[in-house]
Image (spheres, rainbow, N blue to C red):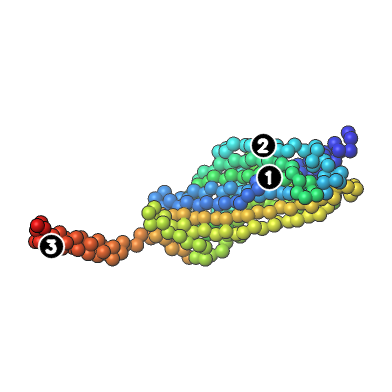
Amino acid sequence: MNSKGLLAFMLVAALAASALIPLSGASNIQVVLNPNANEATVSAYINSSVAISANGSSSLGKVITDVFPHSSNLTINQTTINRGNLTYQVINDSISRMDSNVSLKALSLGYSRSIVNTTEGNNAVLFVNTSLLIKATVSGIFNNNTASLKWRSFSSNNSLALNGKDVSNTSFGGPYLTSSRNVNTLNFTVFSKSISNWTRTYNAATNITTFNMDAGTTVHFQLNGSLAGLPGTNFTVTYSLDPSYSIAAPGYDSASANSIVIGNPPPSSPIGYYVVGAVLVGAAAVMLLIRRRGPSH
């Protein structure tokens, strides 16, 4: 094996666990409340990116530019996860731990990964991007017209497996690196902030109230290291996440720290009726005046 092949093998070994590092772009968690069914649907798109940068003229930089493909993709289509599956139990336990009345009713996962190399100034950069899709139905959240959202910020240090792949435990490390780090992406604790402090909007046309929170970009780690201390293999690796969260429910709703109260839409203002009535009265008066004056000669 030549030197480029050896360095490529070492970098792939360092990235082996990172086949699960989520896709470049903002993450988004969407929850839709359904009072009639006493449940909520959850759609979580956990997206992030690891960027590995090395001087373009260095040994590692040349490997990134010459050996790795310009783009490479892997996709695992959305898959239903059975109740007996360990991944189902991990998410169910993490939700129930936040609220014992709430449980997971249905779950499916999807996954994609892309590897792209590019150049930025004098540096060669390898992006390892993946996207984890979580679709879930959560039941037992309503008591009368009040929905409990204590479970919204669930998290777990356990890994999620899909088709034999770990799709939540992000890792950059191994025997060939002088430094390494791990992050589990199943972590929504940043959204534990009181819902009454989230941004609230009401759409009168659809009678839907939405609560939003944008956590902003978080750099989970930035490392400088090398491959087994070999010359020309210095690198910088950055892992970041940019998550936001929205909760939508029918009605003119209000929120407290951990719950949302489903309310009726406000009554229409009578001012509109008064204006319409005034216009109609005015039009009738004009018509009556015209009739009294009769046709002009």
Which residue is at a point 79% across and 42% down the rendered structure image? Answer: 64
Residue 102, horizontal then vertical, whole percent: 51, 53
Crowdedness of circle 3 by 10 Å Cα count: few (<14), some, many (20+)? few
Which residue bears the numbered disc 2? 74
- Let me know if residue 44 appears in the view: yes
- Let me know if residue 259 appears in the view: no
Amino acid at pointer 2: Leu
Residue 264 numbered mark, or none: none
Image quarter where the N terminus lies is top right
Above or below, 125 against 188 in this view is above
Which comes before the other along the chain, label 2 or label 3? 2
Crowdedness of circle 2 by 10 Å Cα count: few (<14), some, many (20+)? few
Residue 274, horizontal then vertical, whole percent: 24, 65
As drawn, the residue found furthest toward the front would be 297
Q: Who is closer to the viewer here, 204 or 278?
A: 278
Image quarter where the C terminus lies is bottom left
Left-right relation of 296 to 178: left
Residue 239, horizontal then vertical, whole percent: 71, 52
Which residue is at a point 22% across and 64% down the rendered structure image? Answer: 278
Q: Secondary structure at mark 1?
A: strand
Which residue bears the numbered disc 1? 129
Q: Secondary structure at mark 2?
A: strand
Q: CA distance from mark 2 to mark 3?
A: 78 Å
Which residue bears the numbered disc 3? 289
Amino acid at pointer 3: Leu
Above or below, 237 against 116 in this view is below
Which residue is at a point 89% across and 35% down the rendered structure image? Answer: 2
Amino acid at pointer 1: Asn
